[in-house]
Amino acid sequence: EVQLVESGGILVQPGGSLRLSCAASGFTFSSYWMSWVRRAPGKGLEWVANIKQDGTEKYYVDSVKGRFTISRDNAKNSLFLQMNSLRVEDTAVYYCTFSSGRSDYWGQGTLVTVSS
Amino acid sequence: EIVLTQSPGTLSLSPGERATLSCRASQSVSSSYLAWYQQKPGQAPRLLIYDTSSRGSGIPDRFSGSGSGTDFTLTISRLEPEDFAVYYCQHYVSSARTFGQGTKLEIK
């Protein structure tokens, strides 16, 4: 069974940093592009970042470029999102996700709250 | 950068009725890279349709997708009570996964 389990979401002050993790199991992690997607309270889904299977290509939504870094450790079946210079508008539930043809897999999400 | 605009913002219908949701892209997109998602409160999104018209795993056949170029449609032929949720279209390529702003489907 495919499982994606996010962790690391907490309350942090504006300007602070946070590292989210996603533990993957039940599939060949190193074979898939992986993504982070977020949903802010009362708003819609927003794609945040993508990373290629071997980590050589990374892409970000404009609003997080230069502040967030996506990475992965294929040996540990783990995906990460390093979040720096956090802003109030980064408050959201962050999901780890990937697609495999007819199926799409998502974690349960981890809540990041940026507030003073 | 492609922008996806969904309409209407909110759709009020009754169970048993037909729902038609629209997604318009700011420029022509390949129909191979257009998907639809459903999200209910407190749950992760669920893939309904990929490649414009292919149903995801386990998705009932009352859900169908169509379209090309800049205009895409999700149709729910006969609404069931569990279909009332928020729906998103998405354009996906390796470098980005852009979502529309969503359509809320509510019970009339």
Image (spheres, rainbow, N blue to C red):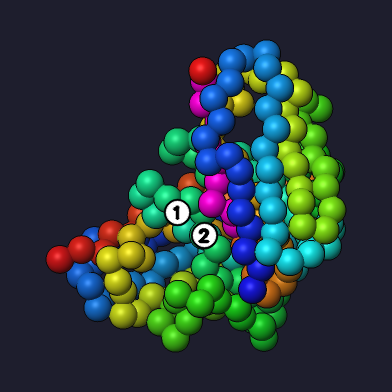
Residue that appears at 45% across and 54% down: A39
Instruction: Say left or right for A107 vs B49.
Output: left
Residue A39's tag is 1
Q: Position of residue A4 (x, y in %)?
A: 56, 54
- Per the image, is A81 magenta? no
Is residue B81 at least partly visible in the picture?
yes
Vertical arrangement, residue B82 with respect to residue B37, above or below: above
Vertical arrangement, residue A10 with respect to residue A67, above or below: above
The quadrant where residue A20 appears: bottom left
Instruction: Say left or right for B49 vs A7.
Output: right
The quadrant of the picture occupied by the N terminus of chain B is: bottom right
**Residue under numbered circle 2:** A46
Secondary structure at badge 2 equals strand
Residue that appears at 74% across and 32% down: B75
- Local packing at callout 2 (Cα closer than 10 Å; few below 14, some 14-19, many 20+) is many
Q: Chain of mark 2?
A: A
* Residues at discs 1 and 2 in contact (Cβ within 8 Å): yes
Is residue A2 at least partly visible in the picture?
no
